Image (cartoon, coloured by chain):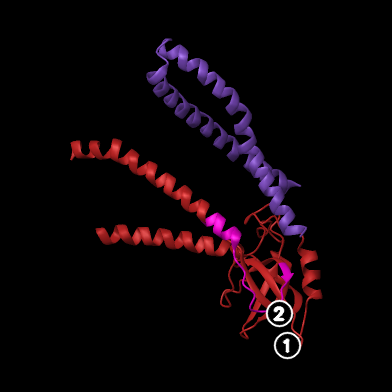
């Protein structure tokens, strides 16, 4: 019985961790190699694309999506999508997709004369289900080894941890004072 | 426009609920503190009168500060994020 309890707890925190890893912003340093647009049917993995697929019969769920191709210092490639999140989720309130695409196009560089860019993004890249992280902003940096400290993530996670602890402490107090004695009396 | 209205409506509802909960929780906590204070140095007046008068003063303060924090802070936060994401 103990295994069930611990399995559920671990599963819960794994889900929470996965959600936070997907939604919180991360910054990569990469060299932009190109930009393109492509038609994507977003009804396949609709959770991984901004906006919702069309529910009107006959109206296609295909959208024209901007992409930014990059290569990292270690040689790996990474392709980001570039979509507005608007007033929706995650709350990045990103409206300047076309501007960002213009900035990315301007920062394209070759391996011989690289221009390194810090790309703030959220989301995951998975080749099998064809999902892409969403680039939120770009800024040029001096080199591929610049140290970037994720201040916002640190603050958000600390606040979350404080909230969880506050709720947990109060729940425990409530349980000890009200529920446990009643359970002891009944059983 | 519709998307913004939907966001604003959901925000207003959630913040409104949070405001209501916080108002009563903070008020109850303040009442407890005042009742303890009466035990220490308020025995001049009957407890309920003594507490009620001071609670009213705290109610006034809370009615100024709480809306500012509960409604103003998220609005400022959203504006800040919009600026940082789109205009920097």
The residue located at (43%, 45%) in the rendering is A166
* Mark 2 chain: A
The chain assigned the colour red in the figure is A
In the image shown, does A46 or A167 lie closer to the viewer? A167
Query: Given the image, what chain letter belongs to the residue carrying mark 1?
Result: A
Residue identified by numbered label 2: A31
Q: Position of residue B60 (x, y in %)?
A: 59, 23
> Is label 1 in a helix, a strand or a loop?
loop
Q: Which residues are magenta?
A: A138-157
Q: Residues within 10 Å of mark 1 (few under 14, many from 20)?
A: few
Task: Pinpoint residue A46: horizontal percent, then vertical percent.
Answer: 61, 63
Q: Disc 2 vs disc 1: Cβ atoms closer than 8 Å?
A: yes
Quickly name the residue at label 1: A111
Quadrant of the snapshot with the C terminus of chain A: top left
Q: Tell whether position A153 is magenta.
A: yes
Spot the purple chain and give its letter.
B
Q: Label 2, secondary structure: give it.
A: strand
């Amino acid at each position: 019985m103990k295994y069930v309890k611990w399995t559920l707890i671990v599963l819960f925190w794994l889900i929470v961790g996965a959600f936070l890893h997907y939604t919180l912003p991360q910054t990569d340093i990469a060299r932009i190699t190109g930009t393109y647009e492509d038609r994507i049917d977003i009804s396949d993995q609709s959770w991984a694309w901004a906006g919702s697929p069309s529910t009107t019969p006959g109206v296609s769920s295909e959208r024209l999506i901007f992409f930014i191709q990059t290569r990292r210092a270690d040689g790996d490639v990474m392709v980001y999508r570039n979509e507005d999140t608007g007033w929706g989720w995650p709350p990045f309130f990103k409206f300047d997709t076309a501007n960002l695409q213009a900035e990315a196009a301007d920062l394209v560089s070759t391996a011989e004369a690289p221009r390194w860019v810090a790309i703030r993004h959220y989301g995951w890249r998975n080749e099998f289900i064809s999902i892409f992280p969403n680039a939120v902003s770009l800024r040029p940096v001096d080199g591929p080894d610049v140290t970037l400290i994720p201040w916002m993530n640190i603050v958000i996670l600390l606040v979350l941890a404080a909230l969880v602890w506050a709720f947990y402490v109060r729940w425990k107090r409530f349980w000890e004072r009200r529920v446990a004695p009643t359970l002891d009396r009944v059983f | 426009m519709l998307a913004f209205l939907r966001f604003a409506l959901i925000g207003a509802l959630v913040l409104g609920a949070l405001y209501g909960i916080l108002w009563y929780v903070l008020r109850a906590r303040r009442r407890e503190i005042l009742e303890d204070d009466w035990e220490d140095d308020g025995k001049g007046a009957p407890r309920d009168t003594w507490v009620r008068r001071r609670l009213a003063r705290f109610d006034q303060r809370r009615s100024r500060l709480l809306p500012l924090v509960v409604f103003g802070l998220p609005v400022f936060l959203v504006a800040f994020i919009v600026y940082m994401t789109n205009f920097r």
